[in-house]
Amino acid sequence: MKDFPEGHEFGIDYKSWTVGPKFMGLKMIPAGVHFVYCSVKGAPRIGFFHDFKSEEIVAKKWDKAKETFSDEVLPDEEVNRIRMNLKNIDSTLGPYPFENYRSWYALTDFVNGETVGRLNPLKGQISAQAELVSMETCLMENEEVPSSNSVDREHPTRTRFVDQQGLPIMKIREGYEIRFIAIPQLAVSSNRAGIDYTDRLERVLRQLGGDWKQLLAEIQFAFACFLIGQVFEGFEQWKRLIHLLCCCPSALGPRSEMFISFIRVLFFELKECPTDFFVDIVSRDNFLTTTLSMLFANIRDSDVAPPELKKKSMQFKTYLTKEFKWDFECE
């Protein structure tokens, strides 16, 4: 990490430090996906996910003017110079915090290089305070429609995009959005009893090539973006996917392996939440108690859910009731 300023936060996965004057990066990072991030002058965190290979060197440069990771790619020659000089700079590299590795792995075990490549913003960086632009600005910056938002004789009025309150519609600047999968809104059959989003689930899985592990990986990726990256959109996508999976009673039989793994994913996510974070954010509006009540009821009443899934569901419900004093008896 070249030119990162002294006295600011730099972290990886669950651990961050205030760095000293000699800091040049980290060493002994286990192979696999990790989240590297920093915060300068108490500003929101910025970071990136990377699928580290064994003995790989990832070299980044700090842009002092923009106070962010530079887009500049260091040439291979410079990376090779760093490799040849590792013994001399060893004392300036902080060791990976292995005391936190098991927790990080449990939180992200489905996330792999494919997940990172699919979800990472095109610009590569994830920011807790991504730059917002109005829809009008997006039009102005789109070269295909340069005149749509300019005022002249032929265009006496400017195109406006406002919400119901008359406020401008804002979006994250292109290239900086986390590319979360969209959950389709499908017509609900009038003869279907209760809530069953299995058709939506299957549509999402088809978008992922039928790989349910990538769906669970996105849940983990979104949660890590929020928990560690402090990105609120990660929390919103996490809630959307949780709600989807909790409302698919018809899938409990054919997708039982996925739901058993889903319960495990949720267990570790809730287990790793700091208490104050959990109370303030995750418990807000009773989202999880309401949504998980549907999951537990669906599994309990299912004629197709296998015994192992029913067992895991009961164990998870008992754990949540004991640990967080949640009441699911309103099912």
Image: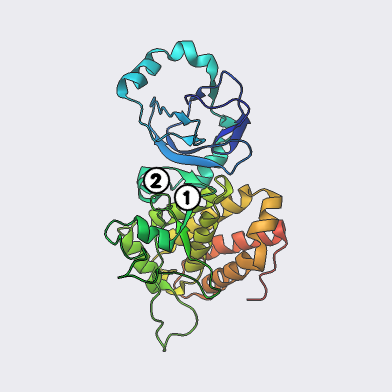
Question: Disc 2 residue type?
Answer: Val
Q: Which of the marked residues, 1 or 2, is nearer the chain's N terminus? A: 2
* Label 2: element kind: helix
The residue shown at (55%, 51%) is: 226
The image's colouring method is: rainbow
Residue occupying the far top of the picture: 88
* Label 1: element kind: helix
Up the image or down, 137 lies above or below 292; here it is above
Picture coordinates of residue 231, whole percent (x, y): 54, 51
Q: Is residue 257 visible?
A: no
Asked whether the beta carbons under mark 1 and mark 2 sit within 8 Å of each other, the answer is yes
Q: Is residue 149 left or right of residue 300?
A: left
Up the image or down, 238 lies above or below 156; here it is above
Q: Pointer 2: what residue?
A: 116
Picture coordinates of residue 246, whole percent (x, y): 51, 68
Quarter where residue 235 is shown: bottom right
The residue shown at (47%, 75%) is: 303
The circle drawn on residue 221 is: 1
The residue shown at (41%, 58%) is: 137
